[in-house]
Image (spheres, helix red, strand yellow):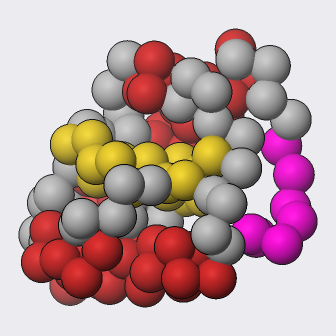
Amino acid sequence: MKLAITGGAGFIGSNYVHHVLQHCPDDSVIVIDALTYAGNLQNLEAVANDERLQFVKMDILDPRVVEVLHGCDVIVNFAAESHVDRSIENAKAFVRTNVEGTYNLLHAARRKGRPLRADRYG
């Protein structure tokens, strides 16, 4: 399987990347992360040399994300605005990423003919 893991440089997403690479030796991972305040490449340092890992710096709002998802079997979305104190100052960023960004991923999956599913990954 080829997994696209959005928000994969964040705390939860990076732990999921580590889990997949450790327990699923036949799978490969593309991490898509905008590296905002919540994403940090240091979270992926321990697996950075794994040939099954590819990193793409990209916001899930970018319509070109469909190109990155080419050939992926599964999309696992951890990309999100998550710090509640930031939502008080700028709720629009939360709506854009958490709602519009998720919609963009769903739309990209549909355009690529990928079924939406939950299995051992989600």
Location of the C terminus (image quadrant): bottom right
Location of residue 9 with respect to 116 vertically, above or below: below
* Number of numbered callouts drawn: 0
The quarter of the displayed image where residue 82 is located:
bottom left
Q: Residue at x 32, y 84 (%)?
A: 11
Q: Residue at x 21, y 43 (%)?
A: 57
Q: Is residue 48 visible?
A: yes
Left or right: 120 as drawn, with respect to 121? right
Q: Which range is magenta?
A: 116-122
Coordinates of residue 84 in the picture (x, y in percent): 30, 83
Q: Residue at x 66, y 73 (%)?
A: 24
Coordinates of residue 118 in the picture (x, y in percent): 86, 61
Location of residue 72 with respect to 93 vertically, above or below: above
Instruction: Return the residue nearer the eye: 107 or 91.
Output: 107
Chief secondary structure of the magenta span?
Answer: loop
Instruction: Return the residue nearer the eye: 49 or 45.
Output: 49
Left or right: 71 as drawn, with respect to 14? right
Q: Is residue 74 visible?
A: no
Left or right: 91 as drawn, with respect to 71? left
Instruction: Return the residue nearer the eye: 47 or 108.
Output: 47
